[in-house]
Image (spheres, rainbow, N blue to C red):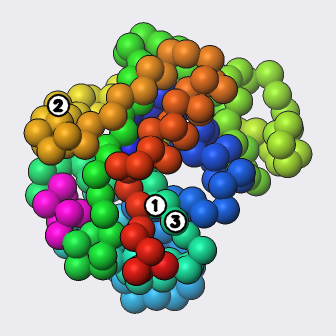
Amino acid sequence: MSGPPGAGKSTALLALDRHHPDLSRFGVRDYGLRLAAAGHPLGLAMREALLRQELLSNELVRLEFAHFLDQLSTEVGLVVLEGYPRDLPQCDDLLRTALDWGVRVTGFVVVTVPDDVARSRVANRRLCTGCGATTAGPEAAACPACGGAMVRRRDDTAVGFARRLADYHAIVDDLRAYFGERAMLREVDGTRPADEVRAAIRDALYAEDTVSLPPAVR
């Protein structure tokens, strides 16, 4: 799954994750830091780069994704990848690794919003330090979901947003073309109300031809 900062993809996936126990999310940064916290050598090799918000080598990301697949619970029936792949070599790595693990990859979801909408959302949103939920405005002092403190993300500054948006635009056309040629591209209008965006993402993910694990792997 991909989309510009402020598209609402992470918020939607957090909500879906709470209601769909068969769904598992893979994010390069989140999973890498979990491995580092557990003292795993792969996570420790990534830790400093992840904390500095630097890009990892494609080989490290491939190994991380393979480790994630290897650790999946037997209850998982749907895998969602956030921010991966991010270039054409990673697209090839993803498909090869999925094939090696018996995972069928046929859906790539892009949540689309205009740049000015994304900019406005990022300038105003706050992140819960407890559960990771976001709010659309700075007024909430506590998370309505868990009561955790609401803070601004470090990379939600104007400079940070501009950098991340430029990074996204630099890769998204190649990713669209790669997965579009394979009839895998799915697009969701991120300007719709949050509940409609969440429903559209859910429908795209749970369609028959999205990222899934065949019964033999479960």
Per the rendering, the mark at residue 33 is none
Q: Secondary structure at mark 2?
A: helix
Callout 3 environment at 10 Å: few (<14), some (14 to 19), or many (20+)?
many
What amino acid type is highlighted by mark number 3?
Gly
Label 3–label 2 contact, CB within 8 A: no
Which mark sits nearer the N-terminus, 2 or 1? 1
Point out the image quarter for the N terminus.
top left
Residue under the point 24% across and 29% down? 169
- Find residue 172 and report its image quarter: top left
Count of numbered badges drawn on the protein: 3
Residue under the point 19% across and 58% down? 90
User: Does residue 91 appear to the left or right of 51 in the view shown?
Assistant: left
Residue under the point 50% across and 15% down? 191
Mark nearer the viewer, 2 or 1: 1
**Can you identify the residue that label 1 sits on?**
79
The x, y position of residue 216, in whole percent, is 40, 80
- Find residue 127 and report its image quarter: top right
**121 or 72: nearer the eye?**
72
**35 or 205: nearer the eye?**
205
**139 or 61: nearer the eye?**
61
Q: Is residue 189 visible?
A: yes
Looking at the rendering, the stretch of residues picked out in magenta corresponds to 90-97
The x, y position of residue 57, in whole percent, is 21, 66
Above or below, comparing residue 87 to residue 160 in the picture: below
Label 3–label 1 contact, CB within 8 A: no
Above or below, comparing residue 183 to residue 89 in the picture: above
The CA distance from mark 2 to mark 1 is 23 Å
Mark nearer the viewer, 3 or 1: 3
**Can you identify the residue that label 2 sits on?**
173
**Can you identify the residue that label 3 sits on?**
77
